[in-house]
Image (tube, coloured by chain):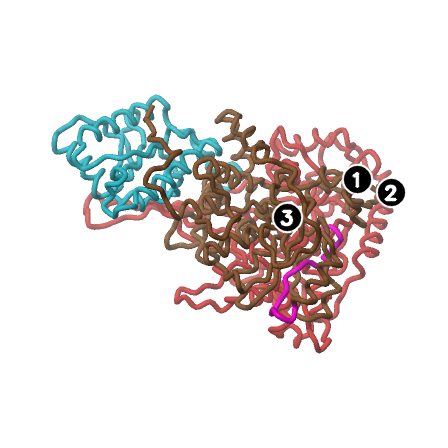
Amino acid sequence: MSVVEGKELRIVGFLCNWCSYGGADTAGVSRFKQPTDLRIIRVPCSGRVDPLFVVKALISGADGVLVSGCHPRDCHYSDGNFYARRRLEMLKRFLPFVGIDARRFHYTWVSASEGQRWQQTVTDFTSLIHELGPAPLLPQNKTLPKEARA
Amino acid sequence: MKKAGYLKKQKEKEFIAALGAKARVYAPCLEDEAVLFKPVEPDSVICLSRPAVSSPKSAIYPQSETLFSFRFKKDSEDPRRTLVELDDTIAVPDTIIFGARPCDARGIAVIDRAFSKTETPDPYYLARRAKTTIVTLTCPEPSTGCFCTRVGCGPAETSDSDVMMTELEDGYLMEALTSKGEALLESPILEDGTAYEAQAKEAQKAAHERMIKEAGEADTTPVDPETFHSQVFWEKAAERCLGCGACTYLCPTCYCFNITDEQVVDKGERIRSWDACMFHHFTLEASGHNPRAQKALRLKNRIGHKFVYYGEKYDGIIACSGCGRCIRGCPVSMEISTIAAALKKNSGTVSGEQ
Amino acid sequence: MNLEKLKEIVRTVLPSVDVVIGYKKGLDALHPVPCFLTSPDEIDALVLNPACMHNLAAYLPSLKNRAAVVVKGCDSRTVVQLAQEGLIKRENVVVIGVPCQGAVSVRKVLSAIDHQPVIEASFENDTVVIKTKKGEARLALRDVAPDKCLACRYPTPVVADHLAGEEVEPKIDEKTAYQEIREFDARSLEERRAYWMAEFDRCIRCYACRNACPLCVCRESCIAETRDPHWMSQKATQNEKMMFHMIHAIHLAGRCTECGECERACPMGIPVARLKKKINMEMKELFGYEPGISMDDKPPMYTFKVEEEKIEEHKIR
């Protein structure tokens, strides 16, 4: 994932198609100023977000991951976000156990009309990630010496 | 015997550090409770007192290695064309495997044939192999599951190593077996070993006798073809097998691999990685058909490769060095030694057990 | 654990099932192995002692026929969980429960005897007697019990059609069961990270933990190995190793019955069960749920409440 070196960090956002993606669009159409670090991946529903998506992103070098769906009781598929809430809460509590800062992962709810709320979420999360700095990289290749080029 | 040196135990660390200055040294290192062959680092704790969980094959044949890396690029002259940049340099360091056991060294000899005695010798493996010196320790004591003498190896077997090292009271006698070994023994840290040779001979003989007592003499009985092709035999033998790859990954002689392209966006690597015949995916074909869909068939392949197929290709040699790692490392204690012994009998009612 | 009683039960049960899964002697007394009995002649080969560590319920989902299975307390939870998820039919399984005083970790025994080759091993009440070249070692069961037994709250099977032995009272309460996890949680983020990096570094991706896990039921379709979807590469890097363990742990969220087989199976001695235990602790706190206790429960990740009492909306700061 390309970023503006020295200025941006890598933040991945998983946004549900019906609410949060719309909310982000609203923010854009309304020309609300937002930081540019976030790379959005549109998913049909927050219920589609496997906690492993988040883990994969974090292990692969993302500095932050944001998941956003419809507000509870407002899911386009009626209960997808209820499942998501349980899974993501589990993940949020598990990550620190293996040494990943839980603050690098945030999940929230933003509706299609909440352009302002979206702007606030992105701005706050991005500034937090900048405070935390780049995620400590996993040693890619500790077991094998460099010469082995594995 | 061409040359012998004596390494005092208190100088072991110093000697290994001196080797480390010249080459990458793989030795059995203590990690928590597990002894693993790893590149020696300044803070490594070397443990020679018991056989390592893993074999040292990874020094020559790493679990995953890059064959080449590639990058796709748009042609700046003609944007419709995509160019590929390849990097296939093989850079290999000098390597010393220190403290292997004779079964480990035998394992490497088994792998050697597969990568060299073929129409397409493998440049990656051979480059590493040529730069590797193997220092083997005489096995003082049989461990749980050891049966090396039964497959024609032995605790003091010298045929596959460059240096043979035998533990004596306050040090090790190091005997060079090849010119590579002689070069390694050129060290001011070593004393002259001539005086200890007789003592070492004794120790080696004693170790050999202990192992024979434990595991028995070499068993050259051929595998019974009827038993070998009995589905019932394999189903019974594989009954408790979990189908994991612990046995193959710990095995010093297993060399099967997989080649995959691991690409992310515009760049990637073609890598070769260990594969295990106990995995379902091992023989899964692109069509979806799997000729070895059941674990019984997969076990037959694993044992068959070691005790039948390999020998058919290479002068009747058994591709098992009797190290017992697969037995000790198996979550359900599958015993390759008893299965192999049962294969040699034709009792009519084949049962896969002793 | 009462072997004679067990044999008697197996004798009565055997005619009504296709196979009885129990334990028999393996390469030595410390390594009994799972066995599959089909005839009464084999009953005398059965063994039952604290070294019978394997969770035999792991074999159930792959069996097509009616089977009887010998289970300890922890293993019985697996039977419940499997039935709850519809992975086995409860009516196809005859559960022979053995109340358990705690098992023996071969790893801990070997460590206690300085990794000497074992010549002989036997069990007396609460002692393991190990004979090695250096002499006889008498080890208290408690000192060589696997971690899971030290935190066991279900020594008597939670479900059993037959019980081979007297019920055993749990020695641990709920709070102390997760003490180890709380202590680990108290370490700094960097320490925890360094700890797991060092542990995962040893992983050889043999998947013994996954295959030994009775609740890892994806089998051939496990995303750690499939090329499509391509979750993981075949590289032996720490990223990949860590990713694999995350997959295993997260797929067991709210399902792990803490039988500890993953950890026991690992040839490298990586404490992988700890990851699952942490998630279990959170499941208990969040949803008051414990896997494999009641047949009528629903795993918490398979359901939801409109108002979650314990989940509050997170603030970014």
Cα–Cα gap, marks 1 and 3: 56 Å
**Three-letter code, disc 3:** Thr
Residue furthest left as drawn = A30
Nearest the camera: A83 or B3? A83
> Tag 2's secondary structure?
helix
Task: Work out which residue is located at the far top of the displayed protein and give it.
Answer: A131
**Which residue is found at the position 68% from the left and 57% from the top?**
C33
* Gap in angstroms between the C-alphas marked 2 and 1: 9 Å
Q: Name the residue under label 2.
A: B199
Question: Would you say the residues marked 2 and 1 are in contact, meaning their CB atoms lie under 8 Å apart?
Answer: yes
Residue A100 placement (x, y as % from top left): 44, 31
Q: Colour of chain C?
A: brown
Discs 2 and 1 lie in a common subunit: yes
Q: Mark 1 points at which residue?
A: B173
> For mark 2, does the 10 Å Cα neighbourhood hold few (<14), some (14 to 19), or many (20 or more) residues?
some
**Chain rendered cyan:** A
Q: Is residue C22 magenta?
A: yes
Q: In this view, does B125 lie to the left or right of C105?
A: left
Residue A14 % position (x, y):
29, 39
Question: Which residue lies at the image location 71% right of the left edge and 35% below the top edge?
Answer: B186
Question: Which span of residues is magenta-colored?
Answer: C14-30
> Residue at label 3?
C156
Q: Which chain is red?
A: B
Is C166 contained in the magenta span?
Answer: no
Question: Pointer 2 indicates a residue of which chain?
Answer: B
